[in-house]
Image (cartoon, coloured by chain):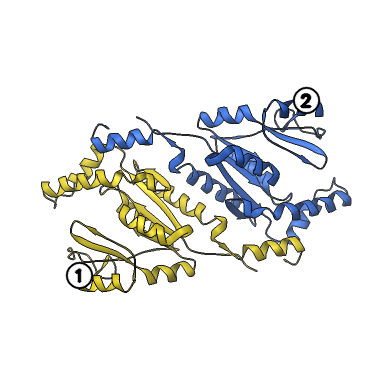
Chain colours: A blue, B yellow
Amino acid sequence: MAITRRGLMLVLSSPSGAGKSTISRRLLEAEPNLVMSVSATTRPRRPGEVDGRDYYFVDPTEFNLMVNRGELLEHAKVFGNYYGTPRLPVEEALRAGRDVLFDIDWQGTQQIEGVAGQDLVSVFILPPSTRELERRLRARAQDSDEVVATRMAKAADEISHYPEYQYIILNDDLDHSTIAVRAILAAERLRRERLVGLTDFVKGLRDGSGD
Amino acid sequence: MAITRRGLMLVLSSPSGAGKSTISRRLLEAEPNLVMSVSATTRPRRPGEVDGRDYYFVDPTEFNLMVNRGELLEHAKVFGNYYGTPRLPVEEALRAGRDVLFDIDWQGTQQIEGVAGQDLVSVFILPPSTRELERRLRARAQDSDEVVATRMAKAADEISHYPEYQYIILNDDLDHSTIAVRAILAAERLRRERLVGLTDFVKGLRDGSGD
């Protein structure tokens, strides 16, 4: 009896500007078994974004229907737009032993926690300092001062939710932080409760029926 | 306010012959922050063993005194001999942010669990197959058939306790298994509850008083 593994749900949250997007991209490049959960959103598509890759872009009526049909694992309203996680692709990936990466905020994490149970692995990424956080938020040249101010307030709010996460990474170096998340993935894959077929394997070891 | 870390207690258990001793030695070589907990025992010293490095060799009366004075974190009787973990060196190491490695069986782990709380990280190492387990137990040429038979019975008993551990490693390759334990160490060091000074750091981030 071979031992297989149920996939896990890796949630990465952080205030905007803490480096989460870069870490996510590097993780997906380095971990062939990890797939990104693509969210549905009502926010307008930005230049360069691709429907079905970056988001599923839907109108508010369609989003509402998805919520009512129970097709979303979680959903939340952020800056006046709705975001949600389609349930089916996640459940299929987990059953196939694939791990799923979620780039969601604390509201989404709280909702996912309720349905994920032991499948959840939650990581909060902190910026190394206030100064660095502000510098990173200002570096997005396309945003107005008003947007930056809103982002700082939102960052402070997001940071206040760090105690709800299992792991904390202080992102003072993108390489180190990526390695840290990969170590968390490697470790969590060895958790007893994710291993399927372990009971039969151990039974074989004990009664000598294993090869 | 700098973030520091409280050390963790890494318990490695396995049936005799599953490769635990080799993995422990490699871990200690690779992880400068990891120190071995040296047990006290009443069993006779074997050739090559050094008092204070391999064990603290004590007589039964002395061992009894250590138990009665509460100087042991755990103790157990195995094959007619007593084994126990001195408390003071462990507590000092954890406070200094050092991680402590314990090579103890399920009885010891159960007792340590009661006092360690969140400091505990427990890993059970399984042999890859029954055949391989028996081969490894027979390979110790100095032991009689009777000792081997006792060891197999003890191994089956030890294996039955795997569900009490947090992580499971199937040791079919010593290099992979050592890397696996190192990933567990790296991940567990990032757990929120081990980080000291995080509350003040985050307060600084939120009110802008952090640098």
For badge 2, the amino acid type reads Glu
Q: Position of residue A153 (x, y in %)?
A: 80, 54
Q: Residues within 10 Å of mark 2 (few under 14, many from 20)?
A: some
Q: Say which quarter of the image contains residue B100.
A: bottom left
Q: Is residue B30 at least partly visible in the picture?
A: no
Q: Nearer the viewer, residue A40 or A21?
A: A40
Q: Residue at x 26, y 45 (%)?
A: B157
Question: Where does the C terminus of chain A fall, quadrant-wise?
Answer: top left
Residue kind at label 1, given as amino acid type? Pro
Looking at the picture, do discs 1 and 2 lie on one chain?
no
Residue B162 percent across, percent down from the top left:
35, 45
Q: Label 2 belongs to which residue?
A: A62
Q: Residue at x 25, y 49 (%)?
A: B16
Q: State the separation of the CA atoms marked 1 and 2.
A: 75 Å
Q: Would you say the residues marked 1 and 2 are in contact, meaning their CB atoms lie under 8 Å apart?
A: no
Identify the chain of the residue marked 2, using the numbered disc in the image: A
Q: For the point 55% across and 55% down, which residue is it?
A: B190
The disc label shown at residue B60, or none: 1
The local secondary structure at tag 2 comes to helix
In the displayed structure image, the side of residue A84 where residue B25 appears, left or right:
left
Q: Secondary structure at mark 1?
A: helix
Viewer-side residue, A138 vs A156: A156
Q: Which residue corresponds to the image point at 80% horizontal and 48% vertical from the top-left?
A: A140
Quarter location, residue A26: top right
Total numbered circles = 2
Q: Residues within 10 Å of mark 1 (few under 14, many from 20)?
A: some
Q: Chain of mark 1?
A: B
Residue B54, image x and y in percent? 27, 65
In the image, A25: left or right of A136?
Answer: left
**Is B10 located above or below residue B131 in the figure?**
below
Q: Is residue B72 above or below residue B125?
A: below
